[in-house]
Every structure is written in structure tokens, then in C-alpha cells.
Image (cartoon, grey):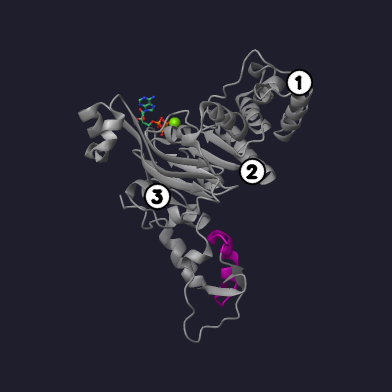
Amino acid sequence: MRVSPDSAAIGVEGLWKIFGPKAAKVLACDDRFLEPAALREKTGCTAAVRDVSFDVRPGEVFVVMGLSGSGKSTLVRCLTRLVEPTAGRVVIGGEDVGAATPARLRELRRHHVSMVFQHFGLLPHRRVIDNVAYGLEVQGRPRAERHARAAEILSLVGLDGHADAFPDQLSGGMQQRVGLARALAVDPQVMLFDEPFSALDPLIRRDMQAEVIRLHREVGKTMVFITHDLSEALKLGERIAIMRAGSIVQLGTPEELVGAPADDYVADFVRDVPRSHVLSLRWISRPPEPGEPLDGPELPASTVIKDAIAAASESSRPIRVVDGDELVGVVDRVDLLTFLSGQDTGDTVTAA
Ligand SMILES: Nc1ncnc2c1ncn2[C@@H]1O[C@H](COP(=O)(O)OP(=O)(O)OP(=O)(O)O)[C@@H](O)[C@H]1O
Ligand SMILES: [Mg+2]
């Protein structure tokens, strides 16, 4: 499911990052195909990102998921060359990042791509407003302008009235809102999030996820969001890339990952997800049988299965599953019951 590189917000092609003194040599020979542990043993090098390619569409929320050490942070740092890739191509907004001069790179990081980290990275001796305005200060904007902009963004992230506080006077959740505000203040094309909420307790975390969804709706930025929390990935991601040992093992919509995991590693990630909460009617609809009545209730193919249960159980006729005017298929009560009764012991879960 590649989009055209020209229309992509971020395009990544054949990206490698090998840490270690002999990185270029490793890449040039067959050693690059070794599993990470074997490569480390043989050469002392770590292949953190291995031949990764993907495109992020403008305005998309693209999630990168994987176990600790799978290469998520390295991958995202390679995008703006905070980590210098060993090989491959990165294009942001049509610009070849690998070809950028140091001055152009600085500009790219200051104006076009901002990052939000797990540890908020706030400046402790500066007030909230000056933390938020920091990126604008680095850009050399006048004080009055940057304070006006920072105040506007503080209000957007729900921190009205906290402009003059110091970071350590705020809770963790509020500090991360300041981190978010700082990243937004420069009005970047792309926002990169490296596990920004993993240090927050679950309730605050849920608030922050809702905040990102709201912000995305309001400002429509392209976002790359790293997490190792599946529920976070499913909530935020339009598409999710699952990384294992430096490679992307599957890239798809939440529905594709949950409905058809590519291997055991992905299946393990999604095994506890109630499939009826993620899969849509499109997934289970079937062609009508000869003579089957086609005058039942109609639902869009994108309807999540759990939301179709009421309609199906109230009707003796199959549900017409439609995409606009087009009939995609039908689903009846028995189909739904069969699906629901199968999902607790479904294909992704192996019997104990
Ligand atoms: N500067 C470095 N020098 C050498 N090896 C590194 C360096 N940075 C990362 N690595 C190695 O690269 C691999 C990928 O690390 P990375 O931090 O990208 O993983 P991650 O998926 O972000 O993990 P986590 O979920 O724990 O943050 C790991 O084996 C790590 O030890
Ligand atoms: Mg990381």
C-alpha cells in the first residue's frame, strides 16, 4: 500500500542504520542479513534499522510499534538525521533530507519537523510560556510575537492560566502538555512523538491520547507516533508499522493487523484485542445466497462489528453492507453470532 513518493509527507526508502565502527563494511557484505545477535557477535556492530521503506501521507497519524530495542527511536531519529543513516533515502515534504546541508538541516528541524519525547525535555529555569516559545526564540522571532503565539498554543492544549509557572510546579501530564505546545508552536509540517506518554499514569495518559486526537483533528498535522502500547496504537494510528529487530514486519491499518496478523510476533501483539471492537462489517460480509431477502437494514461497510450487533439482532433479515450506493455483501444474525462466539478462542489465540 505505497503512496506516490511525490505526494507523501515523509518517504523512506531502503533505510539502514548500523551502529559500530565497521558499519559501512557490514552493509556492503552478506553480514547485513545476519540476525542482530549474530551480527553483534561476529562484527560488534548493531543493526538497529534494517532496510526499512514506507511512506506517510500528508495529515496521517502513522504509528511505529515494536518491543524494546526493535529500532523505533533510531528509525524516527534517522528521519531528521539526529542519527545519521548508514544507507537509504529520506524525503520530507519533497525534500531529500540526506542531501541537506548542515544549515538546511537545522532549518528543517527548527521550522518543519518537531519532536515530542518521553522525558519532556523542558528547561527547568524557564517559565511555561518561555518553554513554549523556545522554538520561536531559536528562530529569532521578536518577543511580543512569540509570546502571543505561545499564549495561543497554551490555550489550545488546555493550559490557560499556567503561563507563568515553572515546569516543576506542574504535574507530569501538564508538563507533557507543555512539551506538546512547544512542538506545536513552530507550526511544523510534521510532528514526531517518541513514546511521549509512557511515563504518565494510565488516566492522564488517556487524557493525553484524547488530546492528540483532538489536536490532530484541529490542526491536521502529519504525525509519526512511537509507542509500545497496542491500545494507544489502535486508538491513534491510521496505519501502524510493527518493527521487529530493525525491520518492519507488517504495515497496515488496525483492522488489517488485528484481522490478519502477518506472523506470530504480530499475532502476539494483537492477541488480547477484542476483534469485534476493531474489525468492520466489511471484514465478515459475504455475498448474498440465492433467494436471500435483500430488503434488510442497511449499514456502512466501515461499521465496527460491535456497533452492528443491535441492528443484526433486531432484524430477521440480513443486514445489507454498503459502501456508498454499492452493496458490498450481507451479514445476518448467525454470521455475527458465529464470529462473536469464535473470537475468544479465535485464530490468533492458541489454546493453553
Ligand atoms: N547510539 C547507539 N550506539 C549503539 N547502539 C545503539 C545506539 N542507539 C541504539 N542502539 C541499539 O540499537 C537498537 C535499537 O535501539 P532503539 O533505541 O532504536 O530501540 P527502541 O525500539 O526505540 O527501544 P525502546 O522501546 O526501548 O525505546 C538497540 O539494540 C540499541 O541497543
Ligand atoms: Mg525508543
**SS class of the residue under badge 1?**
helix
Q: Which residue is mark 1?
A: 143
Spot occupied by residue 192 in the image (x, y as percentages of width and height): 54, 36
- Mark 1 or 2, closer to the camera: 1
Provide the residue span drawn in magenta.
Answer: 302-321
Q: Which mark is residue 108?
A: none
Q: Amino acid at mark 1?
A: Arg
Of callouts 2 and 3, which one flags the residue occurring earlier in the amino acid sequence? 2
Spot occupied by residue 147 in the image (x, y as percentages of width and height): 76, 24
Of callouts 1 and 2, which one flags the residue occurring earlier in the amino acid sequence? 1
Q: Amino acid at mark 2?
A: His
Relative to 208, is 4 above or below? below
Question: Residue sitting at 53 percent across and 47 percent down?
Answer: 237
Relative to 330, is 174 above or below? above
**SS class of the residue under badge 3?**
strand
Label 2 environment density (alpha carbons within 10 Å; few <14, some 14–19, many ≥20): some
Q: Amino acid at mark 3?
A: Gln
Residue 217 visible to an observer of this rendering:
yes
- As for residue 308 lying within the magenta part, the answer is yes
Q: Which residue is mark 2?
A: 216
Spot occupied by residue 101 in the image (x, y as percentages of width and height): 51, 29
Q: How far is mark 1 from mark 3, CA to CA?
A: 46 Å
Q: Are marks 1 and 2 in contact (CB under 8 Å)?
A: no
Relative to 196, is 250 above or below? below
Relative to 210, is 332 above or below? below
Of callouts 1 and 3, which one flags the residue occurring earlier in the amino acid sequence? 1
Question: Residue sitting at 76 percent across and 32 percent down?
Answer: 152
Question: Residue sitting at 70 percent across and 17 percent down?
Answer: 127
Q: How far is mark 1 from mark 2, CA to CA?
A: 27 Å
Q: Are marks 2 and 3 in contact (CB under 8 Å)?
A: no
**SS class of the residue under badge 2?**
helix
Q: Which residue is mark 3?
A: 250
